[in-house]
Amino acid sequence: MKQGLRYLLLLLLLPAVSHLPAQGNADAHVRQGDTYFSQMAYARAMEEYQAAADMGAVNEHVTKRLAECAMKVGDTESAEHWYSIVVKFLNREPRDLYHYAEALKSNGKYELAEEWMDRYLVMADPDGGPRRSNITDFAKKFTQELDRFTVRSVSVNTPFSDFGTTWLGERQVAFVSARNETVGVQRRAAWNDEPFLDLYVADVTAEGGLTDARPLPGKVNSKLHEGPATASRDGGELWFTRNNHFKGRTGRSQNGVNRLSIYHASREGDGWGGLEKFLYNNTECSVGHPALSPDGERLYFASDMPGGYGGADLYVCVRRSGGWSEPENLGQGVNTPENELFPFIARDGTLYFASDGHPGLGGLDIFASPASDQGFSVALNVGAPVNGPRDDFAFIIDAANERGFFSSDRPGGAGGDDIYAFTQHRPLEQRYLCTGIVINDEHEEPMVDVEVTLFDRTGNVVASTTTDARGEYSFPVKQDTEYRLVARAEGMYDGEQHLSTEDIARKQILVRDIHLVPDAGVWLRGTVRHADRLGFIEGMTVSVVNLSSFYSEAHTTGPGGDFSFRLQPNEEFEVLFEKEGFFSMSVPVSSIGMRQGIIDLNDARDLSFDPVVLDEPILLKHLRWAQGSADIDRIGKTELDQLVERLMVNPTLRIEVSVHSDSRGDAATDRKITQQRADAIKAYLTANGVPGDRIVAKGYGSTRLLNHCVPGVECTEEEHAENRRSTYAVIGTTE
């Protein structure tokens, strides 16, 4: 957005200011530039700072201000140049690196942008957090289906900014334009020195273009900015954005800023009038970019009001008798710490909006969020050719989901922001990727032409590829699925990583780097996963203790639950798994008789971990009782041995052992025999080393049935068997 839209991006604007006379030295230009900058007159500030720079004042202050001004007015080439200098200063800030990366991305330089964005991630959060921005992978992902849209410019574009279409019925649109030059300098915006924005109308041609642009009739356009807007399906009402100006009075914030507000207009003959304020306008924050739902019952808008996620967020109000409900933030599925703008609700309920916070191709990208029972929880980038390195926004589509318009400041247009028509040939489908780099662990460098294979959870090959010149691989993956990645290279042990895609909807791309080590020595590896649900456990501490020397080493599992250790040959080890909120586990490991090779602990032990949930019964699945007996059989003892091990490795946990019967016997007798069985379990556990004060034994008889099979009700044997059970539950700790 090089021209008339930057004030909408930051949702801040001051009225026009007059040009002041140029000064004769660099310091004077800097002072004048600072004055313009404080007034958000960024185009004029940039002229003053450039004059100072031309006189030799290329210092940290001037350079950073030139970079900031260039970003504000959308001059990404200049922004890239100046930020390339800013990031070399010793006093650079993390956001300087971020903005430099954003400028590079807007100029299509994705690899360099990724390098600087990754530096920003490290600098912004040195103690943890993501380290990879994956800009190049996202760029590849979003440019895979160039034939899904046909895009073309429309004839109503001018050298000034034209953007922000909205439907006025099926054969007309309203849009925003700065084409009105007749008003003179007094109506030029300080931000970019362009004429102020007004609303216009154009007819939709049979081919899907626009023609016959003319000012919106009626009383909507004023001496300040208008637009964008939204209209009801019946054509009776119009909601539009304007600077806070109503009935000749201009509202300003405490800092003197004229914020954006929403106004309502009614149809009056061939024009619009009867202007009214939106209930939630506020002089201290901006409210704009209205979008009415097809049924007219919900009004969506953008605002920087307090309590959001950062920048401008999207909100919704529900129409009620006599007014509107309180604004509701659309949540993290839509909103980010950056800016979300230009909402539009399609006939099928899909929310389209523009964002510079979700992964994209540069600047603002257009996203789709299908409606669901959970609201708008996923943001899908609509991809190229609608989106590109520059700002793309204000997407609308017809009832058939085939034709529509969007706006962009991409090169090759008539000038400034332009309107583009599109035809959608097939609907949007979300595609997820797994990507990463294969790394030679010994030399810490990427490996080229290495075979990488993707397996599903059952061991079937899903796909295979080789790493590229950067050592990278990539696979399409499905949601809610577990995978195993294996990289193979001559002279190296196979490398493995795991991934689970239950949370991929927001991330879209999962990264798993695979490290390969020379095929020498003994290595222990494995993967820890959730026992009660899909996915692997990140952040579990895995400790390996040499039982001869008592030397220990500990690693923390990554996002795929993977761990690996180099072991001494011909030794015995104990491997301990610990993470708060989970039962700990201890597993013996031996390298006796091994000189080299890999010990995969998953082959020897189920490394699935249950969460510790107070008072949550855990079923002893294999404990069976003979009629009227409290004797524990061999299979039952084997299962109790596992419970002994769990309790010994988790020495602070106290449990209750519970035994239950079905409802077909005598209640008193059942209560007695189940108590005897619970006591037998406790006796077995204590005999095998578990302190008795950590165990409570309860026989409940038939007092806690799980189903409807109460006395006198006919049930199947399977239904009665559900009630006959032995369980244990954590009831506290000894600490």
Image: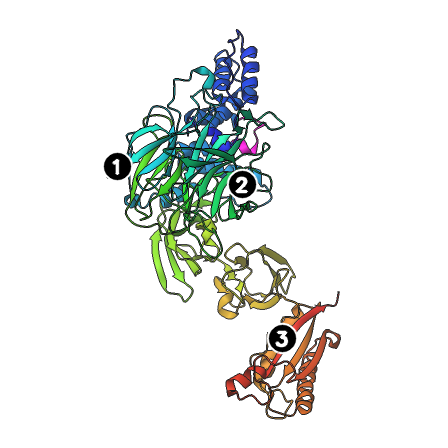
Residue 380 is covered by the magenta coloring: no
Determine which of the numbered discs, if any, sits on residue 337 in the image: 2
**Dot 2 and dot 3 residues touching (CB under 8 Å):** no
From the viewer's perspective, is 429 left or right of 666? left
Between circles 3 and 1, the one closer to the viewer is: 1
The percent position of residue 157, horizontal first and vertical second, equals 32, 28
Other-residue count near label 3 (Cα within 10 Å), few / some / many at <14 / 14–19 / ≥20: some
**Dot 3 and dot 1 residues touching (CB under 8 Å):** no
- Mark 3 lies on a secondary structure that is helix
The percent position of residue 245, horizontal first and vertical second, equals 52, 28
The percent position of residue 260, horizontal first and vertical second, equals 52, 32
- Mark 2 lies on a secondary structure that is loop
Q: Magenta stretch mostly in which secondary structure?
A: loop
Magenta span of residues: 88-96
The percent position of residue 409, horizontal first and vertical second, equals 37, 30
Determine which of the numbered discs, if any, sits on residue 205 in the image: 1
